[in-house]
Every structure is written in C-alpha cells, then in structure tokens.
Amino acid sequence: MVTAPRKETSTMATLSELIGRSITPEARDWKHPRVEILSAPIQRNNHKPHAQYEAEVFNFLLINKEALGIRAVMTFTNLLVDGAVELMDGKRLTVEVKLRMNWEKACQAEWQFRRVMKRTDPKPFPVEGGIVIFEEFSGDWNRKAACRSRENGWNHWHRGHSQVDGLRVGLLRLRASKLEGFPIADALTAKINSLDPVEASRLLASLAAEGG
C-alpha cells in the first residue's frame, strides 16, 4: 500500500526563493601548482597502463619536438590537466592524456580544460587552446558505420567537445609511435604534400573559396 506524502505544515520556501538566492561558493584550497619543463624523457614508477601511456605521450612530444614545431614540453602537477606545449610561434596549448577515449572521457577532458581556464588563482601562463591525446577509442566511440571511413569518436569529439568557451581543443591519437589527427585532415595534408607547388596552390585556393 502506497502512503500519500504528508503535507508540510511549517512554512516552506518556494522554488523561486530556493534557487533565487545569491550564493558564493566556499573558497577552494588549491594545492600549489607545479610546472616542469622537460629536458629529458620521464620515467614513471607507477606501472598502471594510463601512467605508462602518459609518460609515452610526453616523451614522444619531447623527442619529436623539432619536427612537431614545439619549443618546449611541460608537465603539470595540481593544475587539472597533465601538461602543456609551447609552439615555435609562441602559442601555448594545454595537453591532457587519455588512454581510452569515449563519451565519459571526452566530458572529463572538456571539464578539465574549462576549469583550468576559469581558475582565479595565478596561472603559470595563459594558453590559447588545448590538445587531448589518446591511444584508442572505446565503446560506441570505437564503432564505425559501413558508410563511414572513420570511427564514430572523431565525429563525436568535433561535434560536441572541440570548442570550449571560444577556444579550440584538438583531438590527436598516438599509437605505435604515430601521431594522427582527424583522418580526413591527415589524408588532405598528405595529398597536398604529394603535389607540385603549383597544383598544391590551386587546391588550397579552391578549398579556401569553398570555405574548406
């Protein structure tokens, strides 16, 4: 037998009163952040797969920084994201590492980047965007429809997570020592690089005219 809820006889605040209050969250006691500029590959005492993959990512960025157009590779402690890179043009991007990429991990990565940008305590330096590096998609993000040439995860990320408060957060996959981005972009880059300069210029002009 279901008992009807008892009606409160005391004065009850209305929903408008409950949600209309001016609320200031309690101050958070942030741990002191630390930034380390890498000069040599890092080693992890933690043998868990994610910790090992994180070290692999930062070591790859460090070893290949000249080819990737990177001036400096940094790791973070107590800054919500794993690190950052400074490019040759001076642009700085946060770096977050996820061993597996799916909807949950994408939401985490987006939240982490957003929180870093909203921190009110002094930051080590301003950033102009971010990158998330992963090894494999999982769950629904790893599926691929017969009519598509890439896993669902690429489209899911760029539909819902690549723009955060007006800043771009790119998605890259590092596996078997190969760094790759959105498959179509990679294919297009390879195509342009295979053309002679005149043909490449014509293709780029055509793409620009089409908004590509």
Image (spheres, grey):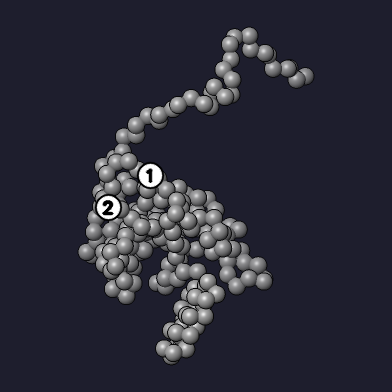
Q: Amino acid at mark 1?
A: Lys
Q: Which mark is residue 125?
A: 2
Q: Which residue is label 1 attached to?
A: 118
Labels 1 and 2 touching (C-beta < 8 A): no
Q: Name the residue nearer the viewer: 154 or 63.
A: 154
Q: Mark 1: which secondary structure?
A: helix
Quarter of the image with the N terminus in it:
top right
The label number, if any, that marks residue 20 in the structure image: none
Nearest the viewer among 161 and 64 is: 161
Which residue is painted at 35% across and 43% down in the image?
119
Where in the figure is residue 50, as x and y percent of width and height? 41, 56
Q: Is residue 2 left or right of residue 117?
A: right
Answer with mark 1 or mark 2, whichever residue precedes in sequence: 1
Quarter-wise, where is residue 176 in the image? bottom left
Q: Can residue 184 be seen in this snapshot?
A: no
Q: Residue at x 28, y 73 (%)?
A: 66
Which residue: 47% across, 80% down?
A: 204
Quarter holding residue 93:
bottom left
Q: x, y (%) of residue 172?
A: 44, 65
Q: Is residue 137 left or right of residue 143?
A: left
Q: Badge 1: few (under 14), some or many (20 or more) residues near its Cα, within 10 Å?
A: few
Residue 182 in sight here = yes
Task: Pick out the residue farthest to the right.
Answer: 1
Residue 100, position in %: x, y?
A: 49, 58
| Tally of numbered discs | 2
